[in-house]
Image (cartoon, rainbow, N blue to C red):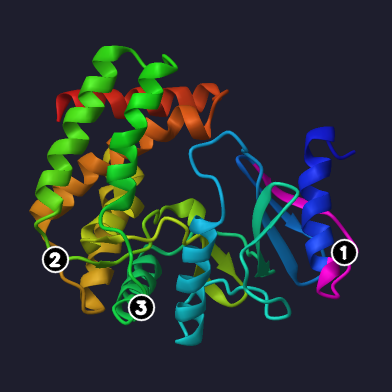
Amino acid sequence: MIPDELKLPIRAATEIAAAHGIFADRCDILQNGSTLVLRLTETLVARVVTDQNGPRQGTEWFARENAVAIHLAHHGAPVIPLHAELPPGPYEHLGFPMNFWQFVTAVDGTPDPQEIGRTLYQCHQLLLTFPDALPELAIVTESIALLDDLERRSLFPIATLRILENRLVSAHAFLKNLPMQALHGDAHYGNLMNTLEGLLWTDWEDTFLGPVEWDLASIIWNARILEEDHATADSILLAYQAAGGVVDPEALHHCLIARAAVMSAWYPILYPDPSPERQMKLQFRLEWLERV
């Protein structure tokens, strides 16, 4: 049974596909959050923004994501490609922005840390030739701006907001002076898939210009800080370096702080009704940020 609140975004996605000669023969819900991910045919996946009151509206984010995904796929990067039978878009229909992707078959198993480091470096190398303009440190500056909305809506205590502001502003002041290039922007395990085609990266809407240590901090944060799984974190970093990457430890430290502050600031937006586990993780991050 499809929930009533999903019927309109599903209709929007199926109508766009049908307008291009592709007719849905199923409606498998792969993810249901602020973004709805639907498998509509054997090969077609739709990604639809359903949060119509969130801070990101319109198609600008998907347009940037599409451009990056096309560039990377064209150059053979380990990424999930856009669907080949539709123009890349992005699309907006019935008030819902969306884009369309090739379905890939996931396989069981945790991604190999060495493969994570190697494939991330491969993506970084190919992103060096991405021709379009990108904003600098976008998710950091966006998170600083988000704090006013969090305060207006009383989503955090004032003392917590001041800690987040201090960590974000300080990190931004340091990071803006480092060498920058196009990044993934949100390089965490949820945006990696073990597939029959190998380890593939996805979800490029947060792409921005920044130091490579931002993506590395994003992918190792849980292992290094939350779980104290230093072997996994070190394996990712060492594999990245073995592939040819250079890691500045001081930059990585500042990026770990900034990543924790960004994730904390966005928690009330991404998880308005968090599970006890998510609440615990948020509290851990906030306490770590206060100490660090």
Q: Which mark is residue 24?
A: 1
Residue at the image point whose x is 29% and y is 78% from the top: 128
User: Picture coordinates of residue 194 (x, y %)?
Assistant: 55, 65
Question: Which amino acid is tagged 1?
Answer: Ala
| Circle 3: element type | loop
Q: Which mark is residue 179?
A: 2
CA distance separating discs 2 and 3: 16 Å
User: Picture coordinates of residue 16 (x, y %)?
Assistant: 78, 63
Question: Which amino acid is tagged 3?
Answer: Phe
| Viewer-nearest residue: 17 or 275 | 17
CA distance separating discs 3 and 1: 33 Å
Q: Vertical placement of 248 versus 267: above or below?
A: below
Question: Which amino acid is tagged 2?
Answer: Pro
- Which stretch appears magenta? 18-32
Chain-order first, disc 2 or disc 3: 3
Residue occupying the far bottom of the picture: 75
| Circle 1: element type | loop
